[in-house]
Image (cartoon, grey):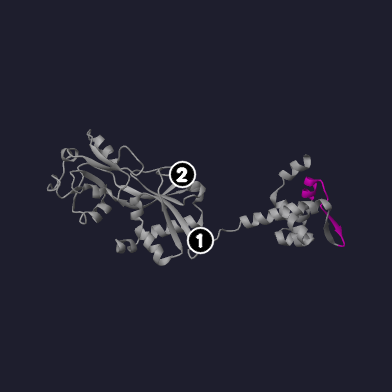
Amino acid sequence: MNALHNMLNIDLNLLKLFTVLYQNGSVSETADALNISQSACSHALTRLRHKLDNDLFIRIDNKMIPTQFSEQLAAKILPAMELLQVGLQPREQFNPDTDTTYTIAATDYTAWCLKPLIEYMHQHHPRIAIRLITLEQRIPEEKLKTGQIDFACGFSHQAEQSQSISGLTWLTDSYVTLTSKQHPLAFKTALSIEDFISYQHILIAPWNEGRGVVDKALIKSKVLRDIALTTPFGLSAPFMLIDTHWILTLPRKYAQYVSDKLALKIHQPPITIPDYKLKLYSHKTRQQDPKIIWFSGILQKIFNTTYYKEVN
């Protein structure tokens, strides 16, 4: 029991010395390999002998010959030291020219916003595959931690702090309000709050929320709106305005894309709605993963350079 206790409390440097000495059988060569003096090497060997209560090596014909105990110890120690050495080697850089799949949880809208990234990957890194999936949680922490997904693509309206999740902001945008061009409010140059709450609304709720950022802004003005339709599908929501008197408030970027195609009118909301930030969420335990670092860098490159402006 005492020997076992001593084994569990051995300095790792002593085990390294044991490994090198077992392999070359020379105190002087071991000292050179470990970049220590021969005297320091001898003293370390003495400490290890005392720790393990065994001679470990016997000098015969100027060669350090392992004892039977050392042979048994080496059978376990050498493979462990090799594994440790491999594990402590610098991480390899991510190679985008190898077959790799990134799994990203996204809403239909955030997936649509990723289109420039997906096009870039197709053109420059064709061996990178993107797999988009949907999840009920806004930030699926456990799936990010275990690597079931690499990223979650979501949005926020305020600063966030988390001990476990890292959020990279890659796009910021504001909200606008849409109506059909046949809507009674379509002719108005500016909407009042009274106009805004006089008609029913569509609520986009990606995670089945009962209320959204518009409702929170209205509460500050001490008014409520009447929601006729709640849908998790942001991209199809504007189609629901056709032939109705409903109102829809959504990100400006997509509103500008569909308004002419669907004959919709863009209005400035009569209330102050905070800008939203598209976020790429990852787990902090994977922040040093070369695969995660590379993708995050590409995302920033695309949305911070002229490439994004050219494709939009």
Residue type, numbered disc 1: Phe
Position of the N terminus, as image quadrant, is: top right
Q: Nearer the viewer, residue 236 or 287?
A: 236
Residue at which label 2 appears? 141
Residue 191 at x, y percent in the picture: 16, 43
Q: Residue at x 37, y 62 (%)?
A: 119
Residue type, numbered disc 2: Glu
Residue 41 at x, y percent in the picture: 76, 55
Q: Is 253 left, or right, of 102 in this rendering?
A: left
Mark 1 nearby-residue class (10 Å; few <14, some 14–19, many ≥20): some
Q: Is 195 left, or right, of 145 in this rendering?
A: left
Tell me if residue 58 is in the magenta stretch: yes
Q: Nearer the viewer, residue 227 or 29?
A: 227
> What secondary structure is marked by label 2?
helix
Residue at which label 1 appears? 94
Residue 150 visible somewhere in the drawing: yes
Magenta span: 46-61
> What secondary structure is marked by label 1?
loop
Residue 61 at x, y percent in the picture: 87, 62
